[in-house]
Image (cartoon, rainbow, N blue to C red):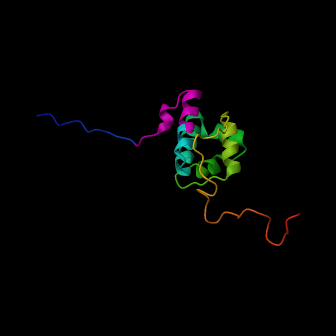
Amino acid sequence: MTTPKKTVTRPYDAARYLKTEESMAAYLEAALEDGDPKVVTSALGAIARARGMAQIAREAGLSRESLYRALSPEGNPEMATFLKVVRAMGIHLHATATENPAPPGAGRPATAIPPGPPPGLLPIS
């Protein structure tokens, strides 16, 4: 009687499948369309691993360790870090208007700065 072979599994890593610049750009675009910051951070991390974390860190002017930390599942990179990493990856971002924009004030966080002049300043009339 033969014993069945054990199935060996490993965690899924999108970086293994990101082989071309086009696939990397499409992956990041899909993450941006999702709108969840954690999904975007995860996509950036996968692309950085696919391209070489040390190379991306060097081109972005960051240490490899800080880049790993920023793009980890617990990471929350600052916008400046995000832009440096995207630029180092050779990805160009652009904005387009949506067909059904949200009404003014929709989606604005509760801590948003109210419109108008800063407190203590009077508008010029």
Position of residue 76 measured from the top left corner of the image (x, y, whole percent): 60, 55
Q: Residue at x 64, y 51 (%)?
A: 66
Position of residue 88 measured from the top left corner of the image (x, y, whole percent): 69, 37
Picture quadrant of residue 106 = bottom right
Q: How many marks?
A: 0
Query: What are the residue bounds of the magenta stretch?
Result: 11-29
Position above or below: 37 against 6: below
Point out the residue furthest to the right here. Answer: 125
Residue closest to the eye, 22 or 106 = 106
Position of residue 78 measured from the top left corner of the image (x, y, whole percent): 66, 53
Position of residue 9 measured from the top left corner of the image (x, y, whole percent): 34, 40
* In magenta stretch: residue 15: yes
Picture quadrant of residue 108 = bottom right
Residue closest to the eye, 45 or 32 = 32
Assign the magenta stretch its main secondary structure: helix
User: Position of 67 compared to 39: left or right?
Assistant: right
Q: Residue at x 63, y 58 (%)?
A: 105
Position of the C terminus, as image quadrant, is bottom right
User: Position of 32 compared to 81: left or right?
Assistant: left
Point out the residue furthest to the bottom here. Answer: 120
Q: Residue at x 15, y 34 (%)?
A: 2
Position above or below: 74 against 90: below
Point out the residue furthest to the left here. Answer: 1
User: Position of 96 compared to 119: left or right?
Assistant: left
